[in-house]
């Protein structure tokens, strides 16, 4: 008899476990299998209650079963929410790092010194030629070096708008931005992108995504 | 010796007691030398048959977050983890409770019928009962304790994260302020004449800032905290303070704005660059 029950329980767990299969998550399978297990345990409890209705074991197991089912649902739900929250936070940390690197490099290291030089110069050279002169040798085919480090692959575009403005567009190829369907400058979608505009009047940066 | 007629109160070193010891020893040895090495060979080092399935499922989600952090995309769940979760679900929620219930009910029935014994069969069932009770205890106690503890752990994580996030945002706001200040510092009135210099010299030769942060277009207050510009002592140095709304580790720390115990950053701005440090971390 125990063998039949074990086979029945296994079927009740395994079938929904694989029916609700999600290649990227275990939670749908786990919830489905858990419901199968709950149905099985309740059926098992009723079986023994009918077989020997007055034993203390039945009462004890009934209490244990109730505690197990209620706490399992509650705890699984909390763990599901908590792990999803942690995953989102990890992504957010990555986006904050990307944003910080772009501001530090594009604005503080690449634009502000050119802005300062522009306002100090005796000759009246336009800000775009001055920028090109400042970063001569570092820009290849309209791109700054693409990689900050092996863990932070980026695309760093430089656009000159006549002599009066330089636009730097930086895309992090890993970090997810705010909008998942945003079209990035490098053709990818949904990644962090920051745009820095350098003119004679200002250094402005904005986070596109 | 008849196995079925010997009772559980046998003296030490009786045949029944020795059988019980032998069977336990054999089962343990089989598990240690045959079952366990097989499991280790077929499963990942961190896979486990009796790890609560929800712990494995949550771990996979966090692992995918780390993969996204490194490469920008998450890998599908590998089959080892999937089968590990299925196995632990079956062992903890199907096999253990079923074995416990059947054995306990059978022993109860045998006690009522006044039959029993400590033969190999009963030793095996006692061993199975102990193992199954242990597994059942793991899942019941573990889940109940988790239900009680995890929400408070989650709350603590959220609070810590809020503090960390505010720290990051305050640094961003300080850097934003620095960028604006640099523009005012370098930009002369020749360019449009609308942006006056940042500093001026008073009649006695002292230096002072012309504008407050708000007049430079810098937001002095946000949901993360407040920014302050310290009166200058030189025209090559500025000190900015950012005081958050969240608590720092020093409860009695006196903040720049006379608050007590809040996160605080100081940013020193020079023409050569910036230096910032946190003064009341958490």
Image (spheres, grey):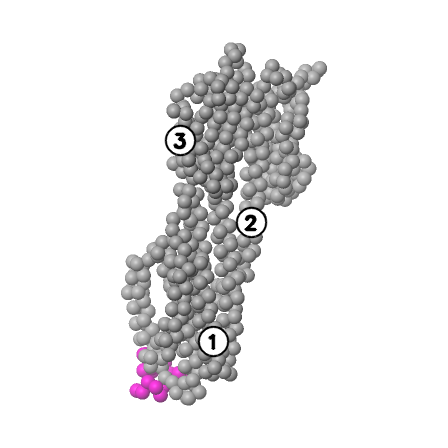
Q: Which residue is mark 2?
A: B158
Coordinates of residue A108 in the picture (x, y in percent) = 51, 27
The stretch in magenta equals B1-19
The chain letter for the residue carrying disc 2 is B
Looking at the image, do the residues carrying marks 1 and 3 touch, with CB atoms under 8 Å apart? no
Query: In the shown orientation, is residue B111 left or right of residue A75?
Result: left
Chain of residue at mark 3: A
Q: With B234 as the anchor, is B29 left or right in this view?
A: left
**Residue B47 found in image quarter:** bottom left
Residue under the image location 62 percent in, 44 percent down: B247
Image depth: mark 1 or mark 2 in front: 1
Say whether residue B7 is magenta: yes
Q: Which residue is mark 3?
A: A146
Which residue is at a point 56% across and 23% down the rendered structure image?
Answer: A202
Q: Is residue A183 above or below residue B101?
A: above
Numbered label attached to residue A45: 1
Residue A10 in the image: x percent, y percent? 38, 69
């Amino acid at each position: 008899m125990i063998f039949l029950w074990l086979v029945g329980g296994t079927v009740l767990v395994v079938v929904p476990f694989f029916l609700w299969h999600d290649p990227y998550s275990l939670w749908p399978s786990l919830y489905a299998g858990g419901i199968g297990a709950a149905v099985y345990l309740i059926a098992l409890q009723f079986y023994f209650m009918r077989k020997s209705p007055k034993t203390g074991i039945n009462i004890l197991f009934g209490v244990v079963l109730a505690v197990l089912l209620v706490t399992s649902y509650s705890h699984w739900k909390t763990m599901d929410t908590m792990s999803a929250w942690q995953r989102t936070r990890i992504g957010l940390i990555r986006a904050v790092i990307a944003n910080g690197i772009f501001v530090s490099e594009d604005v503080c290291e690449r634009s502000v010194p050119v802005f300062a030089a522009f306002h100090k110069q005796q000759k009246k050279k336009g800000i775009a030629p001055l920028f090109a002169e400042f970063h001569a040798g570092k820009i290849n085919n309209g791109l700054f070096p693409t990689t900050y480090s092996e863990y932070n692959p980026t695309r760093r575009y430089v656009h000159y708008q006549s002599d009066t403005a330089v636009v730097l567009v930086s895309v992090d190829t890993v970090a997810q931005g705010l909008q998942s369907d945003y079209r990035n400058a490098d053709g990818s979608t949904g990644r962090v992108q920051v745009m820095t505009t350098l003119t004679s009047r200002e250094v402005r940066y904005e986070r596109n995504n | 010796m008849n196995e079925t007629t010997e009772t559980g109160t046998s003296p030490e070193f009786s045949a029944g007691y020795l059988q019980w010891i032998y069977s336990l020893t054999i089962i343990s040895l089989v598990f240690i030398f045959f079952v366990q090495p097989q499991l280790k060979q077929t499963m990942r080092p961190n896979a486990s048959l009796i790890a609560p399935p929800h712990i494995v499922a949550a771990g996979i989600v966090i692992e995918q977050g780390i993969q996204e952090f490194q490469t920008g995309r998450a890998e599908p769940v590998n089959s080892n983890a999937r089968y590990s979760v299925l196995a632990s679900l079956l062992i903890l929620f199907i096999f253990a409770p079923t074995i416990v219930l059947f054995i306990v009910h059978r022993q109860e029935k045998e006690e009522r019928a006044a039959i029993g014994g400590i033969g190999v069969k009963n030793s095996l069932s006692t061993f199975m009962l102990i193992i199954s009770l242990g597994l059942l205890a793991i899942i019941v106690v573990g889940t109940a304790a988790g239900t009680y503890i995890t929400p408070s752990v989650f709350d603590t994580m959220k609070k810590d994260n809020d503090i960390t996030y505010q720290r990051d945002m305050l640094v961003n706001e300080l850097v934003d302020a620095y960028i604006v200040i640099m523009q005012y510092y370098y930009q002369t009135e020749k360019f449009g004449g609308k942006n006056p210099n940042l500093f001026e010299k008073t009649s006695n030769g002292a230096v002072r800032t012309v504008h407050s942060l708000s007049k430079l277009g810098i937001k002095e207050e946000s949901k993360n905290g407040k920014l302050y510009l310290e009166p200058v002592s030189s025209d090559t140095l500025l000190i900015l303070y950012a005081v958050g709304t969240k608590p720092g580790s020093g409860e009695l720390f006196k903040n720049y704005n006379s608050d007590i115990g809040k996160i605080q950053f100081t940013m020193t701005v020079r023409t050569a660059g910036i230096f910032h440090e946190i003064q009341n971390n958490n």
